[in-house]
């Protein structure tokens, strides 16, 4: 198994306690730290001016939106941002491209090829660029309505820039007022570039959800442990469970059946 997303140590022990976990903590070769700044929507014009300055200087940028088209929500759609940025960039409007998941596959490939080749300098997109996109010349990321994104997703988006060895920036636009949780997410991303630190912070803010169910966030059902805080306790519990399964399997089965009902079984290596 391999994950490109940092997994908090306690969560890894709880979910994958029977596996050896190897961690690559360093950044890949050629990556540079990304400076992250947070802007209120009221400073949108200043952010657009920064984008214009960057692409006029030959650099490339992403502008990420959370929705595809306008609805009842106040969130801006990718199409609306695309039209706005084309108008704002004037004579450089032809450098602006649009990418979202509803486009035909051939058109998406064409847009990405144009951006990778430098024929487009600003790519307005939804989160389809979150993974699998590698354009080293892209050095600026703008995320619109960043308060609506999860911390891990924001970190993934930020990872699209800073791949070419030069200075890189991530600008997070938010709409006030912010909830306490949204403010904490944006502050965490601004203050840290460490994926494992952010994964632990995300665990604290969102909760782990259900370890054995479908719910991926929210308060946990554990009564006597906090996966975000009790690393030592989780490690001791994992080791105790492994000892019990090896040396007293019938007692372990009795406990599991009492908690989970009949039909409990497991595989041992």
Image (cartoon, grey):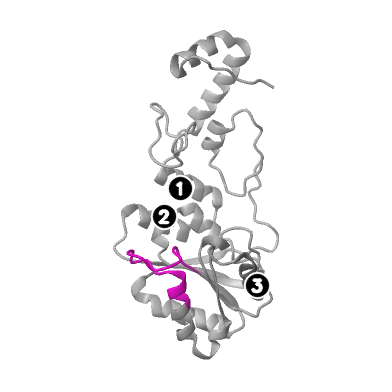
Describe residue 215's horizontal placement relative to residue 21 as left or right.
Answer: left
Mark 1 vs mark 3: give the one in front. 3
Q: Earlier in the sequence, mark 1 or mark 2?
A: 2
Q: Residue at x 50, y 30 (%)?
A: 232
Q: For the view shown, which residue lies furthest in the left direction? A: 177
Q: Residue at x 57, y 14 (%)?
A: 244
Distance Cα–Cα, label 3 vs label 2: 34 Å
Q: CA distance from mark 1 to mark 2?
A: 8 Å
Q: Which residue is at the far bottom? A: 91
- Whether residue 206 is situated above or below residue 246 in the rendered picture: below
Above/below status of 243 relative to 116: above
Is 147 on the left or on the right of 34, as rendered? left
How many neighbours does mark 3 have within 10 angstroms: few (below 14), some (14-19), or many (20 or more)?
few
Residue at numbered disc 3:
110
Is residue 137 among what the camera can see?
Answer: no
Give yes or no for contact between labels 1 and 2 (Cβ–Cβ under 8 Å). yes
Q: Position of residue 240 (x, y in %)?
A: 55, 19
Helix, strand or loop status at disc 2? helix
Q: Which residue is mark 2?
A: 185
Image location (x, y in percent) of residue 174: 38, 66
Q: Which residues are magenta?
A: 64-82
Q: Are marks 1 and 3 in contact (CB under 8 Å)?
A: no
Q: Is residue 73 magenta?
A: yes
Which residue is the site of mark 1? 202
């Amino acid at each position: 198994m391999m994950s490109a997303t940092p997994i908090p140590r306690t969560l890894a022990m709880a979910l994958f306690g029977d596996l050896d976990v190897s961690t690559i903590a360093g950044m890949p070769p050629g990556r540079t730290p990304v400076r992250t700044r947070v802007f209120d929507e009221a400073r949108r014009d200043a952010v657009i001016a920064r984008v214009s300055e960057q692409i006029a200087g030959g650099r490339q940028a992403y502008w990420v939106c959370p929705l595809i088209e306008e609805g009842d929500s106040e969130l801006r759609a990718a199409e609306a941002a695309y039209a706005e940025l084309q108008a704002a960039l004037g004579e450089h409007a032809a450098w602006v491209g649009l990418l979202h998941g509803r486009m035909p596959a051939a058109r998406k490939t064409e847009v990405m090829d144009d951006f990778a080749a430098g024929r487009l300098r600003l790519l307005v997109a939804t989160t389809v660029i979150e993974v699998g996109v590698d354009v080293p010349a892209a050095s600026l990321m703008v995320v619109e309505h960043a308060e609506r994104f999860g911390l891990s997703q924001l970190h993934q988006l930020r990872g699209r820039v800073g791949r070419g060895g030069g200075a890189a920036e991530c600008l997070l636009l938010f709409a006030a007022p912010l909830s306490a949780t949204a403010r904490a997410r944006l502050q965490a991303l601004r203050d840290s570039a460490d994926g494992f630190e952010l994964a632990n912070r995300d665990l604290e803010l969102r909760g782990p959800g259900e370890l054995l169910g479908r719910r991926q966030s929210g308060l946990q059902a554990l009564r006597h442990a906090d996966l975000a805080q009790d690393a030592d306790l989780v490690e001791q519990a994992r080791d105790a469970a492994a000892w019990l399964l090896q040396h007293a399997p019938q007692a372990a089965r009795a406990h599991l059946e009492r908690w989970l009902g009949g039909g409990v079984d497991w595989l041992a290596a």
